[in-house]
Image (cartoon, grey):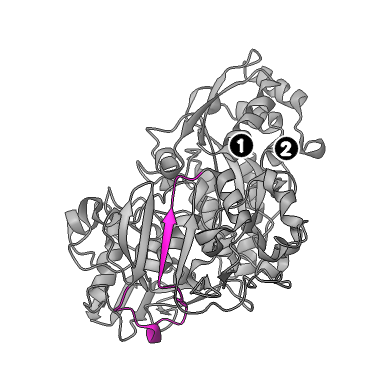
Amino acid sequence: MRRAVLSCAALCTAIPLTLTACSGGGPAASGQAKPTADPATGGTVHVLGKADYSHLDPARGFDGGVNNFYRLVYRTLTTREAAGPHSDGTKIVGDLATDTGRPSNDHKTWTFTLKKELFFQNGAPITSQDVKFGVERAWDPDAGIGSPYAKQVIAAPADYKGPYQSGDLDTIETPNDRTIVFHLKTSYPQFSSVVAQPNFTPFPKGTGAKAAFDTKPIASGPYQVDSYRRGATLELVRNKHWKRSSDPVRAARPDGFVFTFGLDPATMDERLIAGQGKDINAIGAMVQPATIARLRTPQLKPRTLGNVTGCTTYMSLNTTKGPLKDVRVRQAIEYAVNKQTTVDALGGSTLATAATSIQPPSIPGRDATDVYPSKDGTGDPAAARKLLAEAGQSKGFTLTVDARAAATEQAVAVAVQQGLKRVGIKVKINTIDTSTFYEVIGTPSQQHDAALTGWCPDWPGGTTFLPPLFDGRLISAKGNSVLSMLDDKKIQKRIDEIAGMDDETAQNEAYGKLDAEIMKLAPIVPLNYTKTVLVVGSNIAGAHTSISFSGGIDLVGIGLADPKK
């Protein structure tokens, strides 16, 4: 899933547990720190994980977990402010830049001025030329598989292939070491949010070819990679050339971080609940559904955090493959899937609710119209069989669905499998390693009939939800987010019309209406809107969940209550 952005205050109450939702809170149990209290300086935070990050190279990675990690090591022109007691972590602020940019020429030209005292981990100053080079890497055919927005909005020749193959991009100007100017294809008022994307990270010119940054990144943030064993451990230490005076976003309280990968989810839950040894200084991934009930004890409630993710879990349907070419078949699948069983597979209403539209409730202007209504989200097999008969598929067919190698995702795949079995559609589940899943399904030549995935908006509004998923002009050989391969000219025309609207409220409402129009073509099956529940070690402080990172803990503010423990 990609990043999510929305207001915590409006939605945290959706979590039915008596949890310390959004920012934590509540009285700490005797003998343990309050997880949302300000952390002290020093010590090492341990992060427990199921799978390694997709890429350490910010031009390659693009999902909620790794984007959160990137902020420890890298800086961009702008970024989101840190989540905290008085912030939901969604506001865009200057990072490397002194402000959020100065638009001109009807928002087609944007100018940014870099702060002083910006340095790479080797002590070399960060200049506008370094930022330009880092952004140009987004066009590299191999490296540029991450965030798509730079390529979508910055003007560039059709045959431009990044700095390693094509050299400088003339539409990004650097009149001096502290000034950078971007020329866009069209008016884009949200460009301040675009330059907060991971692939706006600066790098010294000429570095990073052939996936070099996946093993040896060059840090511009408060931490740098000290050691890395792919799939096992990743250790961060302080970047001594990072200047706190230039960076009001990152607290950087710990001396370092240790990430441990490849852990069984149930084992992580047990370790965090037990809280022995170094695990008092640890955080982990969302707890398993079976663990939820155990978190209501007086000892665990104070260090339990919860939030909505702002994301939609869905099943994409490849509209170019076999029976799925027929819209009636895709519509039949919409009716056949039992969404309630996918909610149950994720742990019930504590962790998910059934989806009725592509956009989740967090999106401004969202229209909740359910194009394929059913009783209690359990589907309408009779309507599905009727459509299959009209399409000449009354005997059913076989569908291969790509799914991540994780227990909850596999459970959702089985729920989909059982739902479609009711109408004679046989589902084969193709399991893909979690750390490479998005890269695989984002490569059309490797994708099967369908994929179980999700999407979270990169900033508030429909701009970052519908166009990235359904504008067929964005289909690419690598890093493709249009998993349905939908290439509908009417949808594209409407996307262009909405993008040209000056009024943001009207624009969001128009996207809400477009949601239903897209659903009539049935390119995806929205399954559910997800939530997170996490438990942290008893010595963790500064823990605030952020919908900017799919409901996970914002890493830039976290630390330890007592670094000596």
Q: Is residue 377 magenta?
A: no
Please give the name of the residue rendered at 27% of the width and 69% of the height, measured from the top-left corner. 132
- 10 Å crowding of disc 2: few (<14), some (14-19), many (20+): many
**Can the viewer see residue 524?**
no
On screen, residue 467 above or below 373: below
The circle on residue 522 is 1
Circles 2 and 1: CB distance less than 8 Å? Answer: yes
- Which segment did they paint magenta? 239-263
Please give the name of the residue rendered at 71% of the width and 31% of the height, measured from the top-left corner. 335
* Count of marks, rendered view: 2
User: What SS does tag 2 mark?
Assistant: loop
Instruction: Name the spot of residue 49 as percent of width and height, x first.
Output: 49, 51
Give the residue type that dot 1 points to. Ala
Instruction: Name the spot of residue 440 as percent of width and height, x first.
Output: 40, 38
Majority secondary structure of the magenta segment? loop
The circle on residue 136 is none
Between 547 and 18, the one lying in front of the other is 18
- 10 Å crowding of disc 1: few (<14), some (14-19), many (20+): many
Give the residue type that dot 2 points to. Tyr
Residue 181 shown left or right of residue 530 in the figure: left
**Can the viewer see residue 446?**
yes
